[in-house]
Amino acid sequence: MAESYQAELEAKEMGAIENKIVISGLRKVVQMSQSRISELEQEIKEKSTTIAKLEKKYKANSDAQNSMRYDYLKDILHLREYVYLKENKQSVNDYVDARYFEASEDMDERV
């Protein structure tokens, strides 16, 4: 009986040691996971900042493009009106050379 009790104690001690090893391993996994989560959160912040900058740049480019489109169409309308007056032989002496669209005005220096 003493031997079975001794064997039982040894089994419990082995189980306790195995549990400590498992717990230690799980703690390491949790620490590594928390570290990886911190890295991913930092990456998300960086990506969010980059996205915000790109959205701002896109908005500026879009506004510039819309402005150029508006001026270009205004020029075409003006010229169309001039051609119409000229073809109908109406008073074209008071033609005003108005240019609203200047392609190089809104372009970057790189282009």
Image (tube, rainbow, N blue to C red):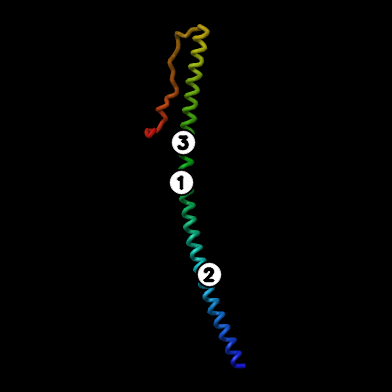
Mark 3, residue position: 60
Q: Residues within 10 Å of mark 1 (few under 14, many from 20)?
A: few
Residue 74 drawn at (x, y percent):
49, 21
Q: Residues within 10 Å of mark 3 (few under 14, many from 20)?
A: few
Element type where label 1 sits in the image = helix
Please, what is the three-letter code of the amino acid marked with disc 1?
Thr
Image: 85 above or below 62: above
Residue 76 drawn at (x, y percent):
49, 20
Please, what is the three-letter code of the amino acid marked with disc 2?
Leu
Residue at the farthest right position = 1
Which residue is rendered at x = 47% and y = 53% of the image? Answer: 43
Q: Quadrant of the C terminus?
A: top left
Q: Earlier in the sequence, mark 2 or mark 3?
A: 2
Residue 72 drawn at (x, y percent):
47, 24
Please, what is the three-letter code of the amino acid marked with disc 3?
Ala
Q: Earlier in the sequence, mark 3 or mark 1?
A: 1
Which residue is rendered at x = 48% and y = 33% of the image? Answer: 63
Q: Is there a contact, CB below 8 Å, between mark 2 and mark 3?
A: no
Which residue is rendered at x = 47% and y = 20% of the image? Answer: 75
Labels in figure, total: 3
Image: 59 above or below 2: above
Q: Earlier in the sequence, mark 1 or mark 2?
A: 2
Mark 2, residue position: 26
Residue 31 drawn at (x, y percent):
49, 66
Query: How far separated are the C-alphas under marks 2 and 3?
Result: 51 Å
Residue 9 found in image quarter: bottom right
Query: How far separated are the C-alphas under marks 3 and 1?
Result: 15 Å
* Residue 11: mark: none
Element type where label 2 sits in the image = helix
Residue 53 found in image quarter: top left
Mark 1, residue position: 50
Q: Is there a contact, CB below 8 Å, between mark 3 and mark 1?
A: no
